[in-house]
Structure formats: structure tokens, C-alpha cells
Amino acid sequence: DQIKIYWYFGTFTRSLLSLFEMTLANWPPVARLLLENVTEFWVPVCLFHKLTMGFAVVGVINGVLMQETFKVAHMDDTVMVREKQRAMRTHLAKMSLLFDEADTSGDGRLDLEEFKSILDDYGVKIWLA
């Protein structure tokens, strides 16, 4: 049993590697080894380490990496062109719907009276502002 403890915590480098493993990889074997061969006192310490370092710190690092990845992807010319095209299609669809609703005569054209009447709608004023 002491040999197993030495494998995980016998030197500074081994301890550092074990903590790294607990933070980013497979933490239960290390916690189980301490529980079975040293004392139960180490279980809350291992859980605290995993909950603070494993979730909080690694979560923050993951969030920063994701944010940077999305920032780079957003700056990509191909992505920017696709987003602009999608925005243009959406805007065209909304404007077509607006003009279809405004064309009360059904002739496919907006005269001045139809345009003025659609502008009387408060929602349309807000949308066009």
C-alpha cells in the first residue's frame, strides 16, 4: 500500500502529476487510494479540489478558449459573408411581408394612401425607426 502511495505522492513531481490528474482527468482513483490507504480525511480535500479547480478554474479556461474561438470564427470572411447574406434574406422577407400587408388593393403596388395608412401603425413606426 505504501508503494501505491509513493507512486502517486512520493515526490514533488509525482504529487504535482497526481493533482494535475485530479484536476483534468480521472480523479476517483487518487481519492480512493487516499481513502483506503491513508485516511478518510482526504476525501473532502479531494472533492474540494475537484469542485474548485476542476470545475471553476477549468470552466473559466474553457469559456475563454470558446470565446476566442468564436471571435476568430466571426472574423472569418466566409462566415461574415454568410451572415450578411442571411441578414439580407431575412430583411427582404420582412420587407416583402410589410409591403404585402400594406397593399390593401392587391394590385402589387403601393400608392401613397396605402403607404400612409401602414405608417399609422405604431408597431410599423417602431420597426422602421
Image (tube, rainbow, N blue to C red):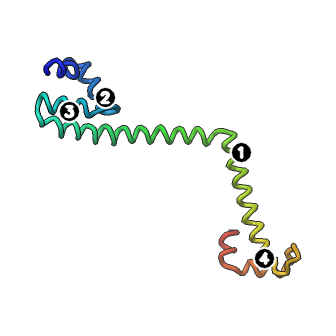
Identity, as a three-letter code, of the amino acid under mark 4? Ala
What distance separates the C-alpha of mark 3 from that of mark 2?
Answer: 14 Å
Circles 2, 1 touching at the beta carbon (< 8 Å): no
Could you say whether the residue bearing mark 1 is in a helix, strand or loop?
helix
The residue singled out by tag 4 in the image is 102
Q: How many neighbours does mark 2 have within 10 angstroms: few (below 14), some (14-19), or many (20 or more)?
A: some
The residue singled out by tag 2 in the image is 21
| Residue drawn at (34%, 32%) of the image | 24
Closer to the chain start, of discs 3 and 1, is 3
What distance separates the C-alpha of mark 3 from that of mark 4?
Answer: 72 Å
Q: How many neighbours does mark 4 have within 10 angstroms: few (below 14), some (14-19), or many (20 or more)?
A: many
What distance separates the C-alpha of mark 3 from that of mark 1?
Answer: 53 Å
Closer to the chain start, of discs 4 and 1, is 1
Above or below residue 92? Residue 38 is: above
Q: Image quarter for residue 118?
A: bottom right
Q: Image quarter for residue 48?
A: top left
The residue singled out by tag 3 in the image is 32
Q: Closest to the observer: 1 or 24? A: 1
Q: How many neighbours does mark 1 have within 10 angstroms: few (below 14), some (14-19), or many (20 or more)?
A: few
What distance separates the C-alpha of mark 4 from that of mark 1?
Answer: 31 Å
Give x and y (percent) for residue 59.
Answer: 38, 41
Closer to the chain start, of discs 3 and 2, is 2
Identity, as a three-letter code, of the amino acid under mark 1? Val
| Residue drawn at (69%, 79%) of the image | 121
Q: Closest to the observer: 53 or 25? A: 25
Circles 3, 1 touching at the beta carbon (< 8 Å): no
